[in-house]
Image: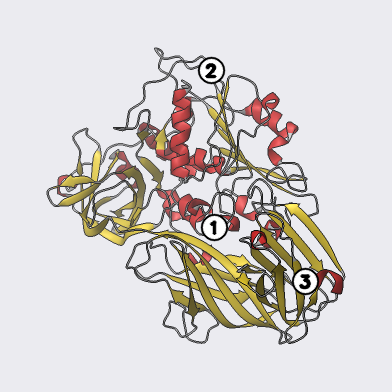
Amino acid sequence: MHAASVLLLSLPQLAGTPGLAERQVLAPASDIVEGVVCLPEPTSLAASSACSLDRLAFARTRDGWAATVELDVERDGGWSLVLLAPGVIDGRILAAPAGAPLRPLDASFALQRRVTLAGDDLPGWVVDRRDLRGAPTGAWTVRIEVDHASQVLDGWILATASSEVSAQAHFSSHARVRGEPLAVLARAQGRDALATTAAELELELEGAREFLPMLDDGLHADGAAGDGLFGAFLPTDALGNFTARAHVHGLTRGGIAFRRSVPLASEIHEAPLVLDGRAELGIGTNGQLHVAVSAQPLDTPRRVHASAELWGARNGVATPVVWLSRLLVPASSANGLSLDFELDERWLDLAGVQAPFELRQVRVQDPDSEGVLAFLAEIPLESVALAARAPLPVSLGANALLASNGTPLSPRQPAPSARPIQPALMLVHGYCSSGAIWPAAHFSAPKLNFLDANANRSHDQFAQLLIAQANAAQLSSYGIVAHSQGGAAALHLLTYYTSGLDYATGQRLIQSVATPYLGTPLASLGFFACGVNSNMTPSGAPTWLAGIPSWARAKVHYWTTSNSGSACNGLTDFFLSNPEDGTVERTRGQLSGGNSMGHVTGWCHTTGMSNPANYTDATRNAAMNAAASR
């Protein structure tokens, strides 16, 4: 690790965590109007799948061990099958249409077989893929037999016959609190799908697995009865991390049965508090406006992520003023708990509003998963102290007001004259990386290689580690070049914490390659890489992104990549829509409000895939190095 010879700025400290300073986050009214900081509709967060996914469950037989799976093949001529296990399954694979004698698969059907390592994301796992030809439509039985118990491995089997048939599934709400209803909803889709005929939910929670029927009866958050949308409620006492697979059965337009499996994952929490519908707006001891949202404790107070929209009246019409957000531990008050925000009172005058004031879309979220712990659509604001205030003359715009509250916007904050800044560049890897990834020769010193090997962190945990390692290396200012999740963690850092990013100068503050700003289906699988990451699932990533204002997004320059033709990975190809790089789809790598630097083909996400890893692109790395803030 290279430690640049620089002085360390003295930053405000969060008690008990050296060098960590949480900031009050503000966003202009335009971010409210344009939906930048609004939670997305749950229906817009559906994950889709064009394959079935089943565990390989081996059982003892007279001659050894065997696992049997029933498959629906909806297209004549061919289908693809993948066996995924931590090591090669050395056994016999038999298959036949239902009711027919089982025959050796490899000898009976013309096919292409490819056996490869799963890659960096599943070290030691093997992908054994077969693309079959001449296999007739209908129900099939596949049986895997091994002779010795030592060959019995945990694993999975995936199958697909057509990308024209898929299924989608999503959660019914953003709430993630034990005791509150939460359903999984699913249906078939695709231009060759005629109807959804049945569905079931396979739920894995704290090591236990159960199957729940999904119903289209209008009683399971599934809309109207018979509308083709099937639903199942999670158990009301569910608590902790869980994975789920919605298995959807349907018919093609030709009347042939098919089955698709959509993986989902999330986390259920104990509710730490409940919003009691009271809030006050007044003048704080520092002269700033102070917003106090009242809550009642349900458990020991803990750190949460609280957000709210402030609205006032302009000519009798409700008008948005500013969005407030921060990470905090609720303060104890005489009436329970208080979630406290601060803002410059000129925000009211910029919006041209007066009393009555109110808060809208008040939400309390878990800081790691961003699951909603408490929510109220509206809270009236008591504002007696402001009832007779005279408007202040405002010549500043929203950007200047943001800067006056410590929120980083151009121009960057200059270093205090007594604490000169030595510029540095931080190189950041992504989720579950086995080590530093950026080629040393591509980036000039002073620089710091962030390292948190083989780890699964939330964006918030990741951001705190970025601060910790920068402070340990005595970096007082830095820009960031990041891969994959590292880009989202850097954006989270810029938004919610005071750090060396606030003092950097240069063209590009944060540059990212192949960051899943809108998530990746792989983050929901559970068995992939270092496990589920709620901030990167197709539902969790957009929920996290709803807490990132436009001013922060504008500081990011990002690239997306994809392969040059052949799939980057024979396994992940089953879950991703083209174009993709083996982990991140182009569509889910977009950052609305960021600076897209384009899409580049011929690159995959990591080593061990069909094309080189995208972080080894010397041309792009040289450009990022030259343009990076420091």
Q: How many labels, in total?
A: 3
* Residue 297 against residue 134 in the figure, above or below: above
User: Going by the image, does 430 lie left or right of 283?
Assistant: right
Q: Amino acid at mark 1?
A: Gly
Q: Nearer the viewer, mark 2 or mark 1?
A: 1
Residues under labels 3 and 1: Cα distance? 25 Å
Q: Residues within 10 Å of mark 2 (few under 14, many from 20)?
A: some
Q: Is residue 567 visible?
A: no
**Nearest the eye: 260 or 59:** 59
Q: Amino acid at mark 3?
A: Trp
- Nearer-N-terminus badge (3/1): 3
Q: Amino acid at mark 2?
A: Ala
Describe the element under mark 1 as helix, strand or loop.
loop
* Residue 627 against residue 399 in the figure, above or below: above
> Given contact means CB atoms under 8 Å apart, are the residues at marks 3 and 2 in contact?
no
- Nearer-N-terminus badge (2/1): 2
Residues under labels 2 and 1: Cα distance? 39 Å
Quadrant including the C terminus: top right
Give the quarter of the image for residue 342: top left
Q: Which residue is mark 2?
A: 4
The residue that appears at 60% across and 43% down in the rendered structure is 484
Q: Position of residue 412 (x, y in %)?
A: 48, 27
* Residue 85 against residue 10 in the figure, above or below: below
Q: Which residue is mark 1?
A: 526
**Nearest the eye: 443 or 241:** 241
The numbered dot on residue 79 is 3
Q: From this viewpoint, which residue is outermost toward the left?
A: 334
**Nearest the eye: 413 or 205:** 205
Q: Nearer the viewer, mark 3 or mark 2?
A: 3
